[in-house]
């Protein structure tokens, strides 16, 4: 059996993995999985905009985008069908929201250079019940556009997986500013007062996912154990850094340790319990229906909400487990829709608050690796 000291060391390392407390310097070197965060201009303005777009938030850091350049002005955005989340996102709704985030960040990056982005969602029709090989959007850069102040936060945006400072309330003025930043502000909701019911619901939904073996193992299969693995495959859930690399080399941090009921799983469970307890505000997005176009539009607003929160010194973390559409989540799903939907469809739910510490950037594939030939 492991010694008390060894278990404490393992717990500390996994706590860093779960909460994102480990921050390393940003180094723009070839092969560095953080290098994409140091965006450099390209000759083709589409490539510059795409280099920013790959920094968009997306579920499980799957980075599900594939892009094809057409002519001299157009980008066709596709879903990488090899990057699905069949257990927790059986209809590809969450991945589509990530593609909406990608598209809005692309538009903002183009506007920063004075270019307008004409966005046509689903130019060949909306795919149902799952996404397919047809393009998600056709994006054409032509004409003039004014820069959007939100873009100033693009390189600093993070998903801060940590307890927030519950002694500092999220002010009503900040909520009003976040709402004003959205393309569809009527679909925005927030709770900054009595959050006990939402906190309980979100935590119970997290436990449902963590205790459903198929759902949880989908996450474990996406874990990248150690710096070498992260550099080779800079997507999914990155467990890396000097301390974790040492634990991996010693055989203390393994995929088996993260299986339900095992030490890594138990540590993650307790860490996320602390994260939910450290929450005094929630925010959510609702659409009138649940069409593909509405899911895509919700993603564009989720990106804008992230950037607006960053500009105001706030942290935002998606906690949308209750919105997942796999069978074991049916109860929390009905509950969250009844509580927040107002007759529409809740597309995203997040924790909002003042972070206690800086969060690190997330590894990314270089933009060139996601562009289809021809």
Image: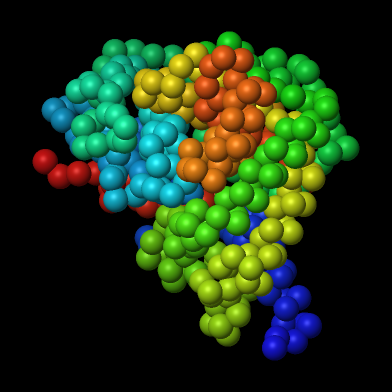
Along the viewing direction, whichever of 91 and 363 lies nearer the viewer: 91
Residue 60 vs residue 360: left or right? left
Looking at the image, the residue that sits furthest to the left is 374
Looking at the image, the residue that sits furthest to the right is 167
Residue 207: image x %, image y %?
Answer: 65, 51
Residue 184: image x %, image y %?
Answer: 52, 13
Residue 51 lies in what quarter of the image?
top left
Residue 76: image x %, image y %?
Answer: 23, 31
Q: In this figure, what is the number of numbered marks?
A: 0
Residue 255: image x %, image y %?
Answer: 51, 71
- Seen at 41% across and 29% down, the residue is 100
Residue 187 lies in what quarter of the image?
top right
Quarter of the image containing the N terminus? bottom right
Residue 48 lies in what quarter of the image?
top left
Q: Is 247 above or below relative to 357? A: below
Q: How is the image coloured?
A: rainbow
Residue 42 vs residue 214: left or right? left
Along the viewing direction, whichever of 287 and 41 lies nearer the viewer: 287
- Seen at 79% across and 44% down, the residue is 278
Quarter of the image containing the C terminus? top left
Residue 201 vs residue 171: left or right? left
- Seen at 38% across and 38% down, the residue is 92
Q: Is residue 26 visible?
A: no
């Amino acid at each position: 059996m492991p010694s008390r000291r060894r278990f404490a060391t393992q717990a500390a390392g996994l706590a860093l993995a779960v909460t994102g407390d480990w921050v390393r310097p940003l180094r723009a070197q070839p092969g560095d999985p953080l290098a994409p965060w140091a965006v450099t201009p390209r000759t083709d303005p589409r490539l510059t905009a795409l280099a920013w777009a790959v920094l968009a938030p997306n579920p499980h850091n799957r980075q599900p985008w594939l892009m094809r350049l057409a002519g001299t002005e157009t980008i066709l955005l596709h879903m990488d069908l090899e990057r699905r989340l069949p257990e927790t996102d059986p209809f590809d709704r969450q991945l589509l929201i990530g593609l909406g985030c990608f598209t809005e960040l692309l538009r903002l990056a183009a506007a920063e250079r004075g270019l307008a982005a004409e966005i046509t969602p689903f130019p060949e029709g909306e795919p149902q019940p799952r996404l397919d090989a047809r393009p998600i959007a056709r994006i054409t850069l032509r004409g003039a556009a004014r820069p959007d102040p939100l873009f100033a936060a693009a390189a600093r945006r993070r998903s801060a997986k940590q307890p927030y400072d519950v002694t500092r309330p999220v002010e009503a003025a900040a909520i009003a500013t976040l709402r004003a930043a959205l393309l569809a502000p009527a679909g925005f909701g927030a709770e900054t007062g009595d959050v006990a019911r939402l906190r309980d619901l979100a935590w119970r939904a997290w436990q449902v996912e963590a205790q459903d073996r198929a759902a949880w193992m989908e996450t474990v299969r996406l874990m990248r154990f150690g710096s070498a693995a992260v550099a080779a495959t800079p997507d999914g859930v990155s467990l890396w850094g000097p301390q974790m690399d040492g634990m991996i080399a010693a055989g203390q941090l393994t995929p088996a340790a993260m299986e339900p009921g095992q030490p890594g799983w138990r540590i993650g469970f307790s860490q996320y319990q602390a994260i939910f307890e450290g929450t005094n505000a929630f925010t959510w997005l609702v659409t009138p229906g649940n069409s593909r176009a509405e899911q895509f539009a919700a993603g564009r607003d989720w990106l804008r909400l992230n950037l607006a929160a960053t500009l105001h010194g706030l942290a935002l973390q998606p906690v949308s487990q209750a919105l997942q559409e796999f069978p074991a989540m049916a109860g929390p799903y009905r509950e969250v829709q009844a509580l927040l939907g107002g007759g529409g469809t809740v597309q995203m739910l997040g924790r909002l608050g003042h972070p206690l510490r800086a969060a690190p950037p997330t590894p990314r594939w270089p933009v060139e690796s996601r562009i289809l030939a021809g």
